[in-house]
Image (tube, rainbow, N blue to C red):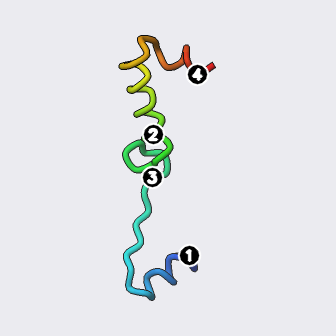
Amino acid sequence: KGKIEEAIEVARHLVLFYTPLHCEINFIAYFCGVAKQYTHANCGCDFPKTST
Protein backbone atom coordinates (compact mmCIF):
# COMPACT_ATOMS: atom_id res chain seq x y z
CA LYS A 1 0.00 0.00 0.00
CA GLY A 2 1.09 3.52 -0.66
CA LYS A 3 1.34 6.24 1.96
CA ILE A 4 -1.73 8.04 0.66
CA GLU A 5 -3.83 4.87 0.75
CA GLU A 6 -2.69 4.12 4.31
CA ALA A 7 -3.47 7.66 5.49
CA ILE A 8 -6.95 7.47 4.01
CA GLU A 9 -7.62 4.09 5.63
CA VAL A 10 -6.34 5.33 9.02
CA ALA A 11 -9.03 8.02 8.77
CA ARG A 12 -11.52 5.14 8.36
CA HIS A 13 -12.35 5.91 4.73
CA LEU A 14 -12.58 3.40 1.91
CA VAL A 15 -10.05 3.56 -0.92
CA LEU A 16 -11.15 2.34 -4.35
CA PHE A 17 -8.91 2.21 -7.40
CA TYR A 18 -10.52 2.01 -10.83
CA THR A 19 -9.09 1.40 -14.27
CA PRO A 20 -7.99 4.89 -15.35
CA LEU A 21 -9.24 4.68 -18.93
CA HIS A 22 -12.67 3.18 -18.42
CA CYS A 23 -15.21 5.47 -20.11
CA GLU A 24 -17.88 5.13 -17.40
CA ILE A 25 -15.62 6.38 -14.61
CA ASN A 26 -13.12 8.58 -16.40
CA PHE A 27 -14.66 12.05 -16.81
CA ILE A 28 -12.58 13.02 -19.84
CA ALA A 29 -13.42 9.84 -21.77
CA TYR A 30 -17.09 10.17 -20.77
CA PHE A 31 -17.26 13.84 -21.79
CA CYS A 32 -15.60 13.11 -25.13
CA GLY A 33 -18.18 10.40 -25.84
CA VAL A 34 -21.07 12.71 -24.95
CA ALA A 35 -19.60 15.45 -27.15
CA LYS A 36 -19.34 13.01 -30.07
CA GLN A 37 -22.96 11.92 -29.59
CA TYR A 38 -24.19 15.52 -29.41
CA THR A 39 -22.20 16.53 -32.49
CA HIS A 40 -23.46 13.58 -34.49
CA ALA A 41 -27.09 14.19 -33.47
CA ASN A 42 -27.17 17.98 -33.87
CA CYS A 43 -24.62 18.98 -36.50
CA GLY A 44 -25.40 16.54 -39.28
CA CYS A 45 -21.78 15.46 -39.62
CA ASP A 46 -19.29 13.09 -38.09
CA PHE A 47 -17.14 14.17 -35.15
CA PRO A 48 -13.76 13.67 -36.92
CA LYS A 49 -14.79 16.23 -39.57
CA THR A 50 -15.50 18.87 -36.91
CA SER A 51 -12.40 18.24 -34.80
CA THR A 52 -9.86 19.64 -37.29
| Upstream in sequence: badge 1 or badge 4 | 1
Numbered disc 4: secondary structure: loop
Residue at the image position 45 percent from the left and 88 percent from the top: 10
> In the picture shown, does residue 41 fall above or below 23?
above
* Helix, strand or loop for disc 2: helix
Camera-side residue of 49 and 13: 49
Image spot of residue 18 (x, y percent): 42, 57
Q: Do the numbered discs 1 and 4 sit on residues whose CB atoms are within 8 Å?
A: no
Q: Residue 51 has which mark? A: 4
> Mark 4 and 3 residues: CB-CB less than 8 Å, in contact?
no
Q: How far apart are labels 4 and 2 at the CA level?
A: 15 Å
Query: Does residue 20 appear to the left or right of 40 in the view shown?
Result: right
Residue ID for mark 3 = 19
Give the foreground label among 4 and 3.
Answer: 4
What element does badge 3 sit on? Answer: loop
Q: Which residue is mark 1?
A: 2
